[in-house]
Amino acid sequence: MDGGGAYGGGKAGAPFDPIQFVQRPQVILRAVCLLFAIIVFGCISSQGYRYDREEKKEVCLYNKDNNACNYGVGIGVIAFLASIGFLVGEFMFEQMSSVKTRKHYVLGDLGFSGFWAFLYFVGFCYLANRWSNSVTPEGGFGVNNLQAAIAFSFFSIFTWAGCAWFAFQRFRQGTAAAFAPSYEADPGSIPGGAPYASYPVGQEGDGGYQEPPFSGNQTRGVIGTDFQAPAY
């Protein structure tokens, strides 16, 4: 089934244009999500933990709540992998010839992006609350990284919500195309349109049926004539 132009994409099998690809809003926003994800889990992983001499183990600097660090790293890593996957999906989107395949991709993008925007909102609130109740580490160790993770968690809410919005717009385009009439209107029913030309009828002959040169009556006349013998 040809899916050319379905769900906001180009016709299947069209030549790939890298310039046009990188200029798509979905691709740009997905790349920003990828960058923010790296910052979030990178900042927490690098300086989010510190060895506590009293407890004799590494503790999270978000008020010694290891769940806060694990949550921030978890959503960041998954967002990083998902962003790569959706970028590959954007690259393959034009090659999806099936309308159902495009629909499943768009719905998956919509559901995941919306859900991850919500998780980033929860993560921002969680990390900000833990940080506000924590004691500043000695020598300011990891302060900038921890604050950057909170800030970019906040920014990620809007980037993932934007991805969900673009996916929703694609879904609306696909739904509108699915219910569009596939037949063409009769030109005669359109104001100013010319009706279809009728089938040409052959012209009738000059007269009716004509008898052949040797009709049946003439034949009978010849047969009925008396035969006369020649005179000697």
Image: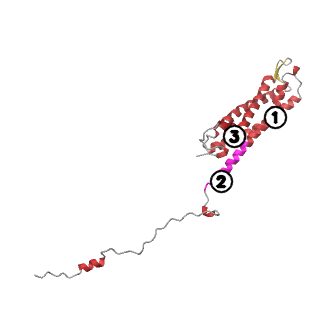
Q: Does the magenta-highlighted stretch encompass residue 167?
A: yes
Residue 98 location, x and y as percent?
61, 43
Residue 203 shown left or right of residue 111 in the figure: left
Tell me where the magenta segment starts and ends, as one range. 166-183
User: Residue visible at 83% across and 27% down?
Assistant: 146
Q: Residues within 10 Å of mark 3 (few under 14, many from 20)?
A: some
Mark nearer the N terminus (1 vs 2): 1
Q: Amino acid at mark 3?
A: Gly
User: Residue visible at 68% across and 49% down?
Assistant: 175
Q: Residues within 10 Å of mark 1 (few under 14, many from 20)?
A: many
For the question of whether residue 89 can be seen, the reply is: no
Q: Amino acid at mark 2?
A: Ala
Q: Which residue is mark 1?
A: 154
Q: Which residue is mark 3?
A: 108
Q: Residues within 10 Å of mark 2 (few under 14, many from 20)?
A: few
Q: Amino acid at mark 1?
A: Phe
